[in-house]
Image: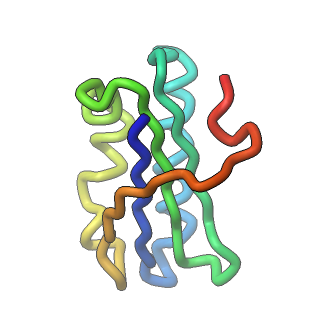
């Protein structure tokens, strides 16, 4: 299973808009229910930093780029950010039910 983390910080006036753009991505994932794909988005305590965590069993089958809601979310992400997205692959050292089905 491949894990990826993406961290970025939005401009203060963009925090709510960013969160509003993320929510439909999860609604569309609920509808399409891609197998072997796990995704979570977090807003950190500063209210401006977001962390997305992706785990996928089939590394070549990322459903996000195919989702209309995800394309809307990413369309102007760079303009919303004070700190641009940083992508990091991660190895799970330990997990308790985080990626369970």
Q: Tell me which residue sits at (64%, 83%) in the image.
A: 46
**The one of 96 and 19 positioned closer to us in this rendering:** 96
Residue nearest the observer in this picture, 53 or 77: 53
Colouring used for the render: rainbow
- Which quadrant of the structure image shows residue 42? bottom right
Is residue 67 visible in the rendered image? The answer is: no
Placement of 77 over or under 81, stated as above or below: above
Residue furthest right as drawn: 96
User: Which residue lies at the image location 30% right of the left edge and 76% below the top edge?
Assistant: 84
**Please, is residue 53 above or below residue 9 in the view?**
above
Would you identify the image quadrant in which residue 2 lies? top left
Left or right of 5 in this view: 93 = right
- The structure residue drawn at horizontal position 57% and vertical position 66%, both measured from the top left corner, is 16
Q: Position of residue 87 (x, y in %)?
A: 32, 63
Decide which of 39, 49 is in the foreground and name it.
39
Q: Nearer the viewer, residue 34 or 97?
A: 97
Where the N terminus falls, by quadrant? top left
**Image check: 12 left or right of 93?**
left
The percent coordinates of residue 35 (x first, y second) are 47, 15
**Residue 5 picture location, percent across and down:** 43, 58
Name the residue: 49% across, 62% down.
17
Q: Is residue 82 left or right of residue 54?
A: left
Res 79 seen here: yes
Against 83, residue 96 (above or below) is above
When asked about the image quadrant of residue 101, the answer is: top right
Which residue, as the protein is rendered here, is positioned at the far front?
93
């Amino acid at each position: 299973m491949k894990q990826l983390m993406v961290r970025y910080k939005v401009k203060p006036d963009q925090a709510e808009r960013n969160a509003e753009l993320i929510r439909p991505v999860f609604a569309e994932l609920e509808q399409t229910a891609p197998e072997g794909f796990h995704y979570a988005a977090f807003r950190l305590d500063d209210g401006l930093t977001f962390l997305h965590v992706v785990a996928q069993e089939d590394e070549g089958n990322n459903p996000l780029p195919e989702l209309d809601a995800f394309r809307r979310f990413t369309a102007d992400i760079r303009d919303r950010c004070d700190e641009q997205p940083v992508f990091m692959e991660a190895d799970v050292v330990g997990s308790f039910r985080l990626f369970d089905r």
